[in-house]
Amino acid sequence: MKIKSKIWIETEEGILISEGRVKLLKLIAETGSLNKAAKAMELSYQKAWKLVDGANKSAKHPLIETQVGGNKGGGTVLTAYGKLLIESFDAINANCWEFLDKEFKKYDL
């Protein structure tokens, strides 16, 4: 048996970050494109934009920046704050799982 848990961080404005949003942000960082990240997650562009926009509105600072046009076309990049938020969430999530596993082992179920 295993214990499972999902966490997310909320503000008064809504969900700031969750496992799904972290995955989307990591794919944006990897691909340089919200559209490509959405396709990789099998999300519509509109749904992906709503997730990122909602997170941006809940955050203290923007998580992504969009770049318009140019020789290579536009794109999307994570901000330093976006990277910090992902790293922090991943650490909190890992610590949560470790704690829950440790607690679960205390019981003979």
Image (cartoon, rainbow, N blue to C red):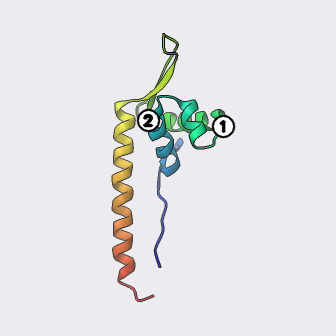
Residue 11 visible in the shown view: no
Q: Earlier in the sequence, mark 2 or mark 1?
A: 2
Residue 72 visible in the shown view: yes
- In this rendering, would 103 be left or right of 18? left
Compare residues 61 and 33 and report the one nearer the observer: 33
Secondary structure of the residue carrying tag 2 is: helix
Q: Position of residue 63 (x, y in %)?
A: 44, 33
Q: Position of residue 75 (x, y in %)?
A: 50, 23
Q: Position of residue 31 (x, y in %)?
A: 47, 32
Crowdedness near tag 1: few (<14), some (14–19) or many (≥20) residues, C-alpha within 10 Å: few
Compare residues 8 and 75 and report the one nearer the observer: 75
Q: Amino acid at mark 1?
A: Ser
Compare residues 42 and 88 and report the one nearer the observer: 42
Crowdedness near tag 2: few (<14), some (14–19) or many (≥20) residues, C-alpha within 10 Å: few
Q: Amino acid at mark 2?
A: Glu
- In this rendering, would 53 be left or right of 81? right
The residue located at (34%, 67%) in the rendering is: 98
Q: Quadrant of residue 94?
A: bottom left
The residue located at (60%, 37%) in the rendering is: 39
> In the image, which disc is placed on residue 44?
1
The relative height of residue 52 versus residue 15 in the rendered view (above or below) is above
Q: Which residue matches tag 2?
A: 30
Q: CA distance from mark 2 to mark 1?
A: 18 Å
